[in-house]
Amino acid sequence: MALAAGADGAPRCWWCVGDALYQRYHDREWGRPVLDDRALFEKLCLEGFQAGLSWLTILRKREGFRRAFAGFDIDRVARFGDDDVERLMADGGIVRNRAKIAAAIANARAARALIDQGGSLTALVWPFAPPLAPGPRSGDELPSTTRQSAALSRALKRGGFRFVGPTTAYAFMQAMGLVNDHLAGCVVRAEVAAEQAAARAALGVG
């Protein structure tokens, strides 16, 4: 669980090497700050679907999820009913788990309620970003949960969100750029760090 050479020979986090889709996700998305409610909602739902599975499994089905869940449009998913649940349970392009499907719909309704109250997912989750830290040297230094992810999990649950335990919340924080867990020496770590610093400054996050 250390740096490994990608397809172009550059050093990358070990977990993405060997699969072109995974490497592209690592290079272009993972850890880059997201300040858009729709994208945050999508990832929160997909992290819930990932529970018990690998992220690569979900990534390979992501376009299927997007089609099935109306592009993760919060308003549209919030209006899903029983017929939509049955449609989704019959869709081989996604993970067909009734509890996770119900959670995604509940999450849309929770997000809609938050927005109706004058809030946003961006404003809810970003204050839980921890202070910037040096890059981990290996995967052994990466936590599965943190104090901040546990606090974020509690905040989300209070808001009616489901499948958002501390481990899921930390994976969400890693992916959405609240933390930078690219290993020290990873080819994209410095670029991701600069983007995160800019996002924090724009949001007033320390």
Image: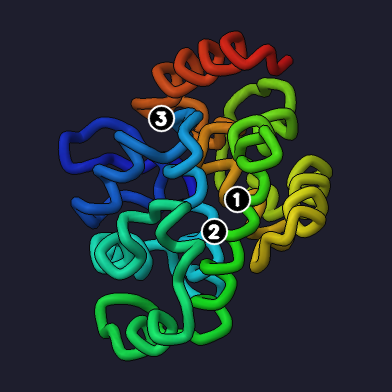
**Which of the colour schemes (rainbow, by chain, secondary structure, one colour) is used?**
rainbow
Across and down, in percent, residue 123 comes to 66, 30
Question: Which residue is identified by label 3?
Answer: 186
Tell me the tag on residue 202. none
User: Rounded to the nearest whole Å, what is the CA distance between mark 1 and mark 2?
Assistant: 5 Å
User: Rounded to the nearest whole Å, what is the CA distance between mark 1 and mark 3?
Assistant: 34 Å
Question: Do labels 1 and 2 touch, CB within 8 Å?
Answer: yes
**Residue 83 in the image: above or below residue 159:** below
Question: Which residue is identified by label 2?
Answer: 108
Q: Quadrant of residue 178?
A: top right
**Residue 187 in the image: above or below residue 140:** above
Tell us which disc is closer to us: 2 or 3: 2
Pick whichever, 198 or 22, lies toward us. Answer: 198
Q: Secondary structure at mark 1?
A: helix
Q: Amino acid at mark 1?
A: Ala
Q: Secondary structure at mark 2?
A: helix
Tell me the tag on residue 111. 1
